[in-house]
Amino acid sequence: MKFLRFLPLFVIAAGLGAAVVRAERDDAVTGSTSWSPVVYPEQRLPLTFSHRMHLARGATCASCHAAAATSRSAVDNLIPTEAECRACHPIDRAEPTRVVAGAPPAACVACHPGWTPERVVERVYLTPPPLKFDHSAHVKTACVTCHGDMTKVDLATTRQLPTMSSCLSCHTDGTQERRCADCHVTKLGGLIETQFAHGALVPRSTGLGDAHGPSFARDHKQEARQVGATCTACHDRSECLACHQGVVKPMEFHPGNYVLTHGVEAKRGTPDCSACHRAQSFCVACHERSGVGTRVTSGFDAAQPGGAFHPPGWATAGMGPNGHAREARKNITSCASCHREEDCLTCHSNEPGKLGASPHPRGWRGSARCEALDRGNRRMCLRCHIAQDELGCNWSAP
């Protein structure tokens, strides 16, 4: 996430008292709506200052922020000190209420609201952003490009710092913009640090198509599959496996009563249960413990009239309706909720003593689909095709 929401602290604010200044989401100056309080933490700016007035009187960015030209770290404090202010303001600490006719304000209270002689001047408080940035490499770019039009701003806060979308307006290289660690600090192992005392870093920008919205935990397939996906910048692959192997149940994924309603989504196949759960070791095992399955005692008995789960002729050894074939082709996952692979192999196997019924449609042998499945997972084919000359989809439908 190249240059995500940051340029160094080009901030000097016009505040009231010692209030904490929180940048707003919707910035009328920069047009940004993706400001992050984790990338740009809260600031305490007990100052009175106006960029608008200073720029109108001929001041330049470099005259107050000279250190920006050589700054190479995001932790550098680029706010002008009293020494820079003295270049124009006749400040004299021995005379805190000083007023010089025709000169800029010099009294302490002019910049430090609420100050009194018996009080210590309140200090500016800035939490360093968790980013890497070389300001000196960007000095040739006009300040307005990254910080907006400061001639309209009195209070300059984190709202005047660029967001990821504004950085990508220049940094558009298809590979560079996806090297997240170029700008984000990393922890041991090279992954992006996402947990901080002031909050957790979660992608919000849609610039790279990885905004983590409310349903992202369930519906992130497209983002994970896209070319140049940035998932591995923050997540170790073990996090994916912990969820997708179905070993650990993420409590936020399914609602509390999901076991009562999951049949609807399971039949739909949306989301695909097999993305996390193995049909035979998870689904069937649970169903059998609940008394639904072919290997447990249940209320269904195919030998009793009206006691069978499936209608007559659902699966026969010879010619017959065999309605299960149509349903299996439509959604075999529904079959796998009760039946194990051994049930299918009773008929659909070429082993000696088995029925040898082909589950394939006419013209299957040698077809593109046949060969594609063989290349993708031959072990599946070998469950039925056991002879050497049968390898590679060598069954022919009658």
Image: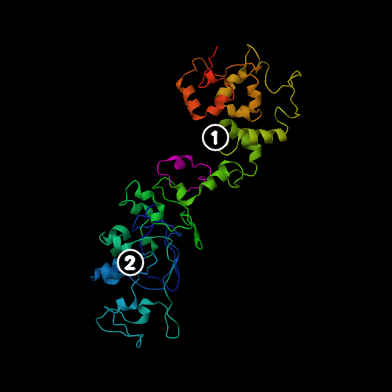
Residue 295 visible in image:
yes
The stretch drawn in magenta includes residue 213: yes
Q: Is residue 353 above or below residue 27?
A: above
Residue at the image point whose x is 46% and y is 42% from the top:
224
From which residue to which does the magenta span run? 212-229
Tell me if 200 is positioned left or right of 151 in this view: right
The stretch drawn in magenta includes residue 345: no
Q: Are marks 1 and 2 in contact (CB under 8 Å)?
A: no
Tell me if 28 is positioned left or right of 243 in this view: left
Tell me if 386 is positioned left or right of 221 in this view: right
Measured as percent of width and height from the top left, residue 344 is found at 63, 23
Measured as percent of width and height from the top left, residue 352 is found at 64, 17
Residue at the image point whose x is 30% and y is 76% from the top:
84
Hey, what amino acid is under mark 1?
Thr
Disc 1 marks which residue?
A: 270
Quarter of the rendering containing residue 319: top right
Disc 2 marks which residue?
A: 71
**Mark 2 secondary-structure assignment:** loop
Quarter that holds the C terminus: top right
Measured as percent of width and height from the top left, residue 184 is found at 42, 57
Measured as percent of width and height from the top left, residue 392 is found at 50, 22
Hey, what amino acid is under mark 2?
Ser
Residue at the image point whose x is 33% and y is 66% from the top:
71
Front in this rendered view, residue 40 or 76: 76
Quarter of the rendering containing residue 47: bottom left
Q: Is residue 54 above or below residue 100?
A: above
Q: Which color scheme does this rendered protein use? A: rainbow
Residue 73 bears which disc, if any? Answer: none
Label 1: few (<14), some or many (≥20) within 10 Å? few
The kind of secondary structure the magenta stretch mainly shows is loop
Residue 149 visible in image:
no
Count of labels in the image: 2
